[in-house]
Amino acid sequence: MSPTLAAVLLIGIFVLAGALIALGLGLSRRARRLEEAGGPAAATGADAASPSVAAPPRPPALRDRLGKTRATLSRSLGALTGHRAIDDEAWDSVEEALLLADVGVATTSRLLDDLRARAAADRIGDPEQLVPLLREELVEDLAGPDRSLHHAPDGPTVWLFVGVNGTGKTTTIAKLARREIDDGRPALLAAADTFRAAAADQLTHWADRVGADVVRGQEGADPGSVVFDAMNAAGGRGAGVVLVDTAGRMHTKVNLMEELKKVRRIAERTPGALQEVLLVIDATTGQNGLTQATQFADAVDVTGVVLTKLDGTSKGGIVLAIEAELDIPVKLVGVGEAPDDLVPFDPEEFVAALFA
């Protein structure tokens, strides 16, 4: 090798070594700056290994779930925008909105009378001001009833669930059972719908999913005997609440109602145990749901309504009809399939969601 080539190679080696040293120093200084700033380089050791804690799920907002009923109201009430005075046509728009939302003829007529009187007293002349006035009227109309679910002061609590098949009775029971268990009250499910094939299997499936016990009888067995056995078993199994599923269909309506009366009498044999008789209604049935409520209320003294599938209907006004015509409070509403989608009914939130 010539002396000239050797010198060139030696110079190249020194240059490369210098570049590597400079690069190493630069990376070291960058890492030190990130560590001082608390950046990614600082997330080492125990800090990097610590798992993130998921925030608890937020309850669903009714504003996001009542779009169909809200759209029904807004289509009719939107006609008020072009009016210069509160005339018959303006009142017809308000009436149409309430009827299309399935508030019902009787309740709509009463609400309109109250709204007319209020508009006159407040000297309202702008048709668009009827909307906030109606909103206030609906909140006041729904105010007052006790919407809480009650528990027995001593011993197991019994909640009886009634309603026709297909309303979501079994899944409602499962969701409430899970909530009670989460609140420290072990749940026992009583499969007293012995008339419908596979009803007990369905309830047992849900009991396994939510961690509840279940008492069931043979298909076709006396529903009252299932309730009797469940109440006897509740104390031994440490159950805080017994949730009773009942039949929603029998050979005749008379047979069904008589059977429900019998089940209630058996539940009442333990003084103070029966705290709620909850009627589960599918909101998509609208005024048909009001007819169902009337029949069940006459038979078993319903204490509250669970209105399911409220997110899938434009007939959310049935809430007002049930409470006004039957004087039965809506205690819970279902606005989705998830366990957390069964929520306590809040009148102010409900009305706000209709007009938001």
Image (cartoon, rainbow, N blue to C red):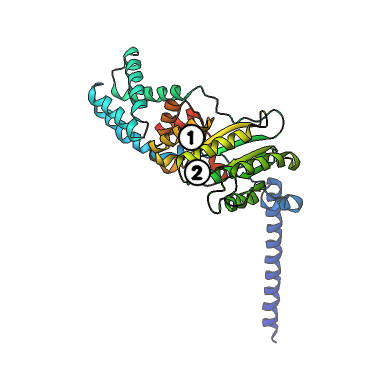
Quickly name the residue at label 2.
248
Q: What is the CA distance from the residue labelled 2 to the residue labelled 1?
A: 10 Å
Residue drawn at (31%, 17%), measured in percent from left and top? Answer: 124
In the displayed structure image, the side of residue 175 where residue 238 appears, left or right:
right
| Residue 298 or residue 52, whichever sits in front | 298
Residue drawn at (63%, 35%), measured in percent from left and top? Answer: 267
Q: Give the quarter of the image for residue 189.
A: top right
Outermost residue toward the bottom in this view: 1
Q: Give the quarter of the image for residue 138.
A: top left
Using the rendered image of the protein, determine whether residue 55 is visible from the camera's viewpoint: no
Residue drawn at (45%, 40%), measured in percent from left and top? Answer: 253
State which quarter of the image contains the N terminus.
bottom right
Q: Amino acid at mark 2?
A: Gly
Q: Judge the density around disc 1: few (<14), some (14-19), many (≥20) Cα neighbours within 10 Å.
A: many
Quickly name the residue at label 1.
296
Instruction: Answer above or below: position of 243 versus 322.
Output: below
| Residue 335 or residue 14, whichever sits in front | 335
State which quarter of the image contains the C terminus.
top left
Q: Amino acid at mark 1?
A: Phe
Q: Position of residue 41 (x, y in %)?
A: 69, 53
SS category of the residue bearing label 2: loop
Q: Position of residue 317 (x, y in %)?
A: 40, 33
SS category of the residue bearing label 1: helix
Residue drawn at (31%, 36%), measured in percent from left and top? Answer: 75
In the displayed structure image, the side of residue 203 where residue 92 appears, left or right:
left
Q: Position of residue 229 (x, y in %)?
A: 68, 43
Q: Position of residue 170 (x, y in %)?
A: 55, 45
Q: How many marks?
A: 2
In the displayed structure image, the side of residue 100 where residue 148 appears, left or right:
right
